[in-house]
Image: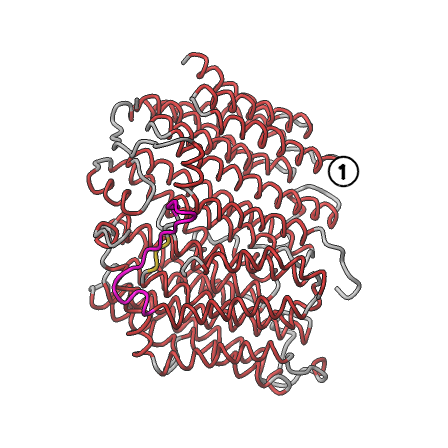
């Protein structure tokens, strides 16, 4: 449990670092490290499939996409983030943390929860038999994003 | 069991706050979008934690996989959009995108 | 059978790029319009008989094993399907001519078909998470469609739309997760049952608030409307019509109504919140529309205002109010897409959207002018067009429920709407013909055909309003007004 809480704090800290760092590349790396920690948290929650998926897709593919974009958009004068936002962040963070802790404490032991239908079968059966229509949705999503990227990068013809 | 759930949800909400803050205050388009990715991390954490607590870890993993696919597709589309904006205006500053007044 | 509504557009969208390599324009045109026509015919002809004995649930089995593909078609879903396929058919007819000069037509049709699949899927599922999933499918397709022209305005509008929409989606999925944690279920019946037996007012209230924020942003209710006046004018005209006429209704109003009326149950507090949101949208957007010079921006603000009417009617909760709200949904979809398509015709002919620069176009573009009159009068609520009946029903429902102030505001907003639409008419189509437009011609064949079909439907629904209400709207209103009983009644949900 202690390890879980440490890892969770690690995720939060690296995400905050990704926001505060000025260099875009370092932000992307911090994001990847945060995803790595999140994947380990998932493994320890007895969810190996999603842990592997998170690490390979979010820490892998999304980081690659970010690095490619950063490489393609190197500007001459980098966009200067406002100093005020960076200095104000810890203040807002601490305030929100306090509110968060207070709300959590007040809800301790008072959250009613109903039993749910326990999982049957293996993960494969759950994904392919119980949530089949989700897969149709995923196909739709992948088609949408593929066509979106194709449309946004198409060659402009002469009569546009 | 429910206290564990509250603990995980508290962290997920923290991640969501960081994501929202980044979205509201950053000026670089790519930085701004990192906020959305952090928010998505918070949501996946909430999803898997809820499944873990309710003994439904397999269902939660199936849902979380769908959610990560959503996230990847949105990231791909947005980054394509950002690259196009860079090619059009030459800068990644969100303050330059103020032609439309809402 | 019902699965076709989602599967057919996806399959055709998948093969369209390949076909686009063989035939740049003709085959994609025929295929896309064929898909829309086929689904429209399916919905119109088969729909009524399918649901005549209560909602239909389809489960599939493949290779002997039962898959869990539960799709549910009830009155409300059928009404949305008909609206989406009818308006979508006219929009794709219009795109035959309009999208010629944007390039990559097959790609455009593919994106449009994926958006259609997402919207159809949204209205047919029985599961909260799947509503979120298909909402995202339609949304991702719409991001690319708004930015399709690749100009500065379009890209900026698409980026802002994307950011706001992503925030809304995050709140929606968070609310769904909390509900899953509380009730242990994701499908409508399970969650409704769980919410009835649970006693967690604080957390359920938070979930409801998140849903109002998320779905309200998708539906462009004030104060979550900021993305719409930028996104809708910048998109190509058929996409403006699709967004304003269809997407905000399916992913905003349908999802809101389904979740709040059939799953949560409409409590008095919820009803009050929805009614106030509706009234504020109605008035604020109407006032903002008055000051606009851009044709499409005025139409965009008018959309926000009319969505206010729909939410006011549905939020009222009485059977008559829901009936009026749903009827107005259908009417607004027809009329607003008609108006946006016409604005595209005008933009294509004159190259401008600025009302001050237009003038006297009615002489050179008679069909466009006539259909715009029909659309404007319909939304403004002039008898005997369809908009009049739906607004009348909403106002009567408000008076019946003794909400005098709301009824009065609704009538006044209606007058405001009429005023700014007549302004458009006068500035753009009547008056002296500006010399710059001496040489404009009427819009090409498919564009005028599409708008004429929509205009005739407006007139037809207006004249035959009683028959329309009895056949299509009443079953939808019944499904909603029975509230939680529908999901709990075990009617296959």
Which residue is at a point 48% across and 58% down the rendered structure image?
A: C247
The picture places residue C69, in percent across and down from the top left corner, at 39, 49
Q: In the image as oriented, which residue stretches furthest toward the front?
A: C64
| Residue ID for mark 1 | A75
| C55 part of magenta stretch | yes
**Residue A126 figure quarter:** top left
Q: In the image as oriented, which residue stretches furthest toward the bottom?
A: C363
Which residue is at a point 55% across and 57% down the rendered structure image?
A: C11
The picture places residue A6, in percent across and down from the top left corner, at 47, 15
Q: Is residue C49 left or right of residue A64?
A: left
Which residue is at a point 72% across and 60% down the rendered structure image?
A: C21
Q: Is residue C98 above or below residue A148?
A: below
Q: Is residue C448 visible?
A: yes
Q: Secondary structure under badge 1?
A: loop
Numbered range of the magenta stretch: C48-68
Which residue is at a point 52% across and 18% down the rendered structure image?
A: A10
**Residue C323 figure quarter:** bottom left
Report how many numbered discs are placed on residues in the image: 1
Q: Is residue A16 left or right of residue C483?
A: right
Q: Nearer the viewer, residue A107 or C471?
A: C471
Chain identity of mark 1: A
| C477 part of magenta stretch | no
The picture places residue A89, in percent across and down from the top left corner, at 54, 27
Q: Is residue B100 left or right of residue C48?
A: right
Q: How is the image coloured?
A: secondary structure
Q: Is residue C268 visible?
A: no
Q: Is residue C266 above or below residue C359?
A: above
**Quarter of the image that includes the N terminus of chain C:** bottom left
The picture places residue B17, in percent across and down from the top left corner, at 47, 32
Q: Is residue C468 above or below residue B72?
A: below
């Amino acid at each position: 449990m202690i390890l879980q809480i440490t890892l969770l704090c690690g995720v939060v800290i690296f995400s905050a670092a990704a926001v505060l760092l000025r260099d875009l590349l370092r932000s992307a790396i911090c994001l990847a490290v945060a995803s790595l920690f999140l994947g380990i948290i998932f493994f320890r929650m007895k969810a190996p499939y999603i842990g592997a998926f998170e690490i390979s897709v979010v820490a892998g593919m999304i980081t690659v996409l970010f690095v490619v974009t950063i490489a393609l958009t190197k500007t001459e004068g980098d966009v200067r983030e406002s100093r005020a936002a960076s200095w104000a962040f810890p203040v807002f963070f601490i305030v929100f943390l306090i509110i968060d802790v207070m709300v959590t404490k007040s809800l301790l032991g008072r959250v009613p929860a109903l039993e749910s239908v326990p999982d049957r079968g293996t993960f494969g059966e759950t994904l392919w038999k119980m949530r089949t229509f989700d897969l149709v949705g995923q196909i739709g999503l992948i088609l949408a994003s593929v066509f979106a990227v194709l449309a946004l990068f198409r060659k402009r013809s002469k009569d546009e | 069991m429910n206290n564990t759930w509250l603990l995980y949800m508290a962290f997920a909400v923290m991640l969501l706050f960081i994501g929202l803050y980044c979205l509201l205050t950053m000026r670089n388009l790519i930085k701004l979008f990192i906020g959305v990715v952090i928010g998505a991390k918070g949501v996946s954490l909430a999803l898997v934690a809820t499944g873990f607590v309710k003994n439904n870890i397999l269902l939660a993993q199936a849902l979380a996989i769908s959610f990560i696919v959503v996230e990847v597709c949105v990231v791909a589309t947005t980054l394509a959009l950002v690259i196009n904006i860079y090619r059009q205006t030459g800068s990644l500053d969100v303050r330059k995108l103020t032609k439309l007044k809402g | 059978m019902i699965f076709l509504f989602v599967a057919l557009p996806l399959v055709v969208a998948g093969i369209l790029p390949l076909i686009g390599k063989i035939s740049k324009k003709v085959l994609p045109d025929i295929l896309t319009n064929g898909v829309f026509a086929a689904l429209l015919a399916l919905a119109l002809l088969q729909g009524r008989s399918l649901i005549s004995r209560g909602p239909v649930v389809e489960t599939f089995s493949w290779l002997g094993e039962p898959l869990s593909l539960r799709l549910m078609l009830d009155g409300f879903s059928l009404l949305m399907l008909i609206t989406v396929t009818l308006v979508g058919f006219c929009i794709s007819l219009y795109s035959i001519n309009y999208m010629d000069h944007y390039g990559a037509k097959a790609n455009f049709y593919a994106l449009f078909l994926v958006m259609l699949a997402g919207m159809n899927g949204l209205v047919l599922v029985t599961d909260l998470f799947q509503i979120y999933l298909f909402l995202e499918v339609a949304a991702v397709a719409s991001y690319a469609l708004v930015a399709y022209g690749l100009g500065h305005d379009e890209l900026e509008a698409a980026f802002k739309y994307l950011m706001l929409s992503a925030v809304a989606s995050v709140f929606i999925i968070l609310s769904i997760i909390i509900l899953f944690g509380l009730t242990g279920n994701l499908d409508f019946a399970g969650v409704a049952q769980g919410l009835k037996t649970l006693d967690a007012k604080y957390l359920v209230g938070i979930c409801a608030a998140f849903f109002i924020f998320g779905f309200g942003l998708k539906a462009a209710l004030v104060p979550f409307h900021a993305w719409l006046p930028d996104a809708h004018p910048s998109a190509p005209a058929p996409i403006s019509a699709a967004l304003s006429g269809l997407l905000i209704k399916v992913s905003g109003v349908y999802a809101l109504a389904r979740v709040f009326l059939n799953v949560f149950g409409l409590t008095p507090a919820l009803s009050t919140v929805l009614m106030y949101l509706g009234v504020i949208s109605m008035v604020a957007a109407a006032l903002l529309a008055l000051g606009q010079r851009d044709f499409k921006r005025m139409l965009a603000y008018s959309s926000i205002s009319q969505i206010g009417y729909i939410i006011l009617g549905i939020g009222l909760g009485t059977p008559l109010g829901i009936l009026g709200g749903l009827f107005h949904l259908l009417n607004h979809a027809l009329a607003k897409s008609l108006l946006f398509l016409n604005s595209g015709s005008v933009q294509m002919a004159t190259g401008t959207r600025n009302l001050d620069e237009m003038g006297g176009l009615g002489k050179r573009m008679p069909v466009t002018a006539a259909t715009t009159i029909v659309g404007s009068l319909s939304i403004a609520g002039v008898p005997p067009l369809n908009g009049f009946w739906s607004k009348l029903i909403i106002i009567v429902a408000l008076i019946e429920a003794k909400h005098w102030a709301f009824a009065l505001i609704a009538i006044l907003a209606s007058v405001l709407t009429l005023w700014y639409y007549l302004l458009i008419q006068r500035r753009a189509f009547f008056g002296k013909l500006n010399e710059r437009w001496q040489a404009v011609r009427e819009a090409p064949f498919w564009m005028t055909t599409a708008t004429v079909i929509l205009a005739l439907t407006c007139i037809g629904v207006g004249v035959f309003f009683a028959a329309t209400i009895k056949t299509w709207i009443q079953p939808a209103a019944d499904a909603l007004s029975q509230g939680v009983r529908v999901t709990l009644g075990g009617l296959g949900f």
